[in-house]
Amino acid sequence: MIKLGFWGSYKTDILHYFSRILNALDKRVIIYDDSNDEYLYHSIPMVDRGFITYRDVDIYINREGSSLEISNEEYDVTLMDFGFDQSKMHQFLDCDIKLLVTDFQRHNILRVKDMMVEINDKPDLIRIYRDIVDSKINTRYIDNLLKLEDSFNLLAEYNLYFDEVAYKSQIECQYNDIISFKKLPKEYKIMFKEIIREFFSSDDKTVIKAIKTAEGGR
């Protein structure tokens, strides 16, 4: 089983998109929300925290003080969201693939900096900046502020610019029963393709076909 750990600001839509694509690749997927944010809990039809199967993807919302033992025999992939919970840093660093997702809101950038205090040995990391706008607070400015390369070995860096269609998909996947993301900007699809190809030993043709299947809501 491969564990993808996500740290940072809002990423519920990205978790949904990854899960749908991996599901289209016939991977048995579970999303494990171990954050304090409850974004996922409030975006799917759950009456209580716990376990639900939502459109062929299992989702577990952690209750306070509880945990779920995930079987290697039951799942191929776990997508784990830790939010900014510093107490979960060890679990995040234990994941096979570590992804940092953040926008440029100052309170989120400062929490990323707080997280880096506990990092040793320069673990591998995929860095994702999202909702970037044309401003003097640009990717170079944030890179200089965070200096992620001092704490991590950066495997890949993705810049997702603010886009009205992407924002529409983000909102609609919180309300609609069918998760569709047909018109996402190409930067998103390149990111999905490269990460899945690299870590799941899939060729471009197979991944692109899975993306097309998933983005239509199937």
Image (spheres, helix red, strand yellow):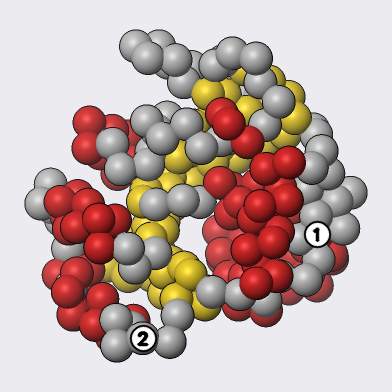
Query: Is the residue under label 1 in contact with that under label 2 (CB below 8 Å)?
Result: no
Label 2 CA crowd tier, 10 Å (few <14, some 14–19, many 20+): few
Instruction: Write down the residue under mark 2.
Output: 135
Question: In what element is the residue under mark 2?
Answer: loop
Question: Is residue 214 placed above or below 182 in the rendered structure?
Answer: above
Residue at 17% across, 63% down:
151
Residue at 55% across, 58% down:
199
- Residue 74 lies in what quarter of the image? top right
Q: Would residue 7 be found to the left or right of residue 210 on screen?
A: left
Residue at 73% across, 51% down:
172
Question: In what element is the residue under mark 1?
Answer: helix
Q: Amino acid at mark 2?
A: Ser
Question: Is residue 65 placed above or below 108 in the rendered structure?
Answer: above
Disc 2 from disc 1: Cα separation: 31 Å
Q: Amino acid at mark 1?
A: Glu
- Report whether residue 21 is seen: yes
- Residue 57 lies in what quarter of the image? top right
Q: Position of residue 106 (x, y in %)?
A: 25, 63
Instruction: Write down the residue under mark 1.
Output: 215
Q: Earlier in the sequence, mark 2 or mark 1?
A: 2
Rendered image: mark on residue 151: none
Residue at 39% across, 52% down:
9
Q: Tell us which disc is closer to us: 2 or 1.
A: 2
Q: Position of residue 21 (x, y in %)?
A: 73, 53
Label 1 CA crowd tier, 10 Å (few <14, some 14–19, many 20+): many
Question: Is residue 60 placed above or below 81 in the rendered structure?
Answer: above
